[in-house]
Image (cartoon, grey):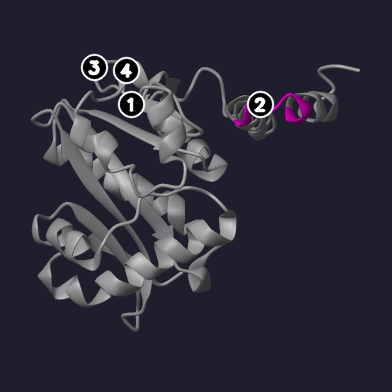
């Protein structure tokens, strides 16, 4: 895989539109909520050296991720992690995530690194890096972060729960704890997929959906 991952800057402004289009298309295909971003926002991240981009040997866009900091650098989040369809199933997402994770620890020393996601693949990558699942109360309380969820299709759920829970799972890496130790409880896709489905049913607030789901998961007969 002849792909380079570098810190994005002004010379990469030309990729901003395809980055936004790839993120939005992926979300639509997966049927998941995602906060939309504009090309101008992506370019600002590049200008501030708060983004990484993956390019192949011909300069074709392969992947992207950017950094957001909150509460004066006390918390850091990675957003917009995406791999172009032409470069998927090559392990590139994990390479990008690992690169931006290590870069974040250097640029924002001491910051807690967190994320919220509905994607099991992202949860697996985060778990491998040492993140642990946490309630939203352990994440940043900066209202600017949560306002960024307004363009997500699940925002009404988040708002109705007073920003304390949603379909997303919160995950946190605290460098004050033993850094980069392998997780004590390895990520189990089957278990997390079950929990994700249960959470979706809870938010549907529909008794028929509860019964149907719980029967499918063999939780009731």
Q: Position of residue 176 (x, y in %)?
A: 24, 17
User: Could you tell me how far apart the alpha carbons at marks 3 and 1 are, in whole angstroms?
Assistant: 9 Å
Task: Residue under label 1, please give it.
Answer: 173
User: Would you call the spot at circle 1 few (<14 residues within 10 Å), some (14-19), or many (20 or more)?
Assistant: many
Q: Given contact means CB atoms under 8 Å apart, are the residues at marks 2 and 3 in contact?
A: no
Q: Position of residue 201 (x, y in %)?
A: 66, 29
Image quadrant in which the C terminus is located: top right
Q: What is the magenta segment's predominant secondary structure? A: helix
Which comes sooner in the sequence, label 3 or label 4?
4
Depth check: give the residue in front, 41 or 66: 41
Q: Given contact means CB atoms under 8 Å apart, are the residues at marks 1 and 2 in contact?
A: no
Q: Which residues are magenta?
A: 204-209
Q: Is residue 220 magenta?
A: no
Residue 90 makes an appearance in the image: no
Task: Residue under label 3, please give it.
Answer: 176
Q: In the drawing, what numbered circle is on residue 138?
A: 4
User: Is the residue 103 above or below the residue 15 in the image?
Assistant: above
């Amino acid at each position: 895989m002849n792909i380079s991952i570098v810190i994005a800057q002004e010379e990469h402004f030309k990729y901003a539109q395809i980055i936004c289009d790839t993120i939005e298309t992926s979300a639509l295909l997966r049927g998941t909520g995602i906060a939309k971003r504009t090309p101008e926002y992506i370019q600002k991240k590049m200008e501030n050296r708060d983004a990484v981009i993956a390019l192949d040997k011909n300069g074709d866009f392969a992947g992207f991720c950017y950094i957001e900091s909150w509460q004066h650098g006390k918390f850091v989040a990675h957003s917009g992690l995406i791999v172009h369809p032409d470069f998927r199933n090559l392990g590139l997402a994990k390479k990008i995530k690992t690169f931006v994770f290590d870069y974040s620890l250097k640029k924002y020393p001491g910051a807690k690194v967190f994320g919220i996601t509905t994607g099991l693949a992202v949860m697996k990558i985060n778990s491998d890096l040492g993140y642990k699942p946490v309630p939203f109360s352990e994440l940043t309380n900066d209202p600017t972060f949560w306002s960024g969820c307004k363009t997500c299709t699940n925002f009404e759920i988040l708002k109705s729960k007073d920003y304390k829970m949603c379909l997303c799972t919160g995950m946190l890496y605290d460098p004050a704890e033993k850094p980069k130790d392998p997780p004590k409880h390895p990520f189990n896709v089957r278990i997390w997929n079950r929990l994700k489905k249960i959470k979706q049913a809870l938010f549907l607030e529909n008794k028929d959906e509860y019964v149907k789901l719980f029967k499918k998961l063999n939780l009731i007969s």
